Amino acid sequence: GAVVSQHPSRVICKSGTSVKIECRSLDFQATTMFWYRQFPKKSLMLMATSNEGSKATYEQGVEKDKFLINHASLTLSTLTVTSAHPEDSSFYICSAHTPGHHTEAFFGQGTRLTVV
Amino acid sequence: GQNIDQPTEMTATEGAIVQINCTYQTSGFNGLFWYQQHAGEAPTFLSYNVLDGLEEKGRFSSFLSRSKGYSYLLLKELQMKDSASYLCAGMDSNYQLIWGAGTKLIIKP
């Protein structure tokens, strides 16, 4: 099946710094990728839809200037958490559908972000 | 509004059968998904139903009734490794996944 690779899997950073998370589709071209955040014992919360070559579409309540999304190529989308705070500590997951095929979302491994 | 409901937690015995129910309300409908998620890991795909009926895949089966807005995931011959959260997700008319909160399944020996 299709593979989505997410890096890093774990990161610890200091308050006020920025962290970049990469999401790559390894064997297909993903025109659209999705970024989720998951709190402990909670379901996935869609943060934004990342569209190749255009601006991301953010869900209501998600700060665009804090969570910067770039989808510069058909195989790479990045999420940058800027000026991180402890409340940004969470599990971040990206996913992608294969083009024209909506019957399965392929997930990256997830990134556990801890802000100290 | 769009909504997915599933039980928060279920407990079952190793070797037994368990059914996890899910009811959904979406704007349009393009299918119902079940994912398995172990703690600290990303979800992995289990099943997809878009037509009414039962889809069987080894020990796991998934059922859909579109008229009732209802689905279930059936797990047979439970193994300890099946202890995980099971996420139900409906796909709306924009092909966006609407996620349930997940059902934590605890398997006891």
Image (cartoon, coloured by chain):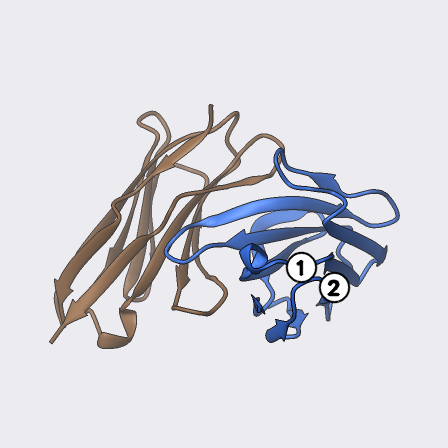
Chain colours: A blue, B brown
Mark 2 neighbour class, 10 Å CA radius: few under 14, some 14 to 19, many 20 or more: some
x then y, percent, for residue A29: 78, 60
* A80 w.r.t. B96: above or below: below
Q: Secondary structure at mark 1?
A: loop
Q: Badges 1 and 2: C-beta atoms under 8 Å apart? A: yes
Please give the name of the residue rendered at 60% of the width and 66% of the height, measured from the top-left corner: A108
**Residue B8 point in image, percent of width and height:** 26, 48
- Name the residue carrying label 1: A84
The residue shown at (40%, 43%) is: B100
Residue A41: image x %, image y %? 37, 56
Amino acid residing under circle 1: Ala
Judging depth in this view, the residue of A115 and A56 nearest the camera is A115
For the residue pair B71 and A57, the one nearer the viewer reads as A57
Q: Secondary structure at mark 2?
A: loop
Q: Which residue type carries mark 2?
A: Ser
**Residue A107's x, y, as percent?**
58, 62
Q: Are marks 1 and 2 on the same chain?
A: yes
Q: Residue B35's image quarter?
A: bottom left
Residue A106: tell me if it is visible.
no
Using the rendered view, name the quadrant where residue A58 is placed.
top right
Report how far apart the C-alphas of labels 1 and 2 lie in the structure: 6 Å
Residue at the disc numbered 2: A18
Q: Residue at x 34, y 60 (%)?
A: B85
Subunit bearing disc 1: A
Left or right: B29 in relation to A81: left
Please tell me which residue is depicted at 75% across the width and 56% down the height of the picture.
A30
Chain where mark 2 sits: A
Comes first in the chain, label 1 or label 2: 2
Image check: B86 left or right of A91?
A: left
Please tell me how crowded label 1 is: few (under 14), some (14-19), or many (20+) other residues with Cα within 10 Å: many
Q: Between residues A9 and B58, which one lies in front from this camera angle? A: A9
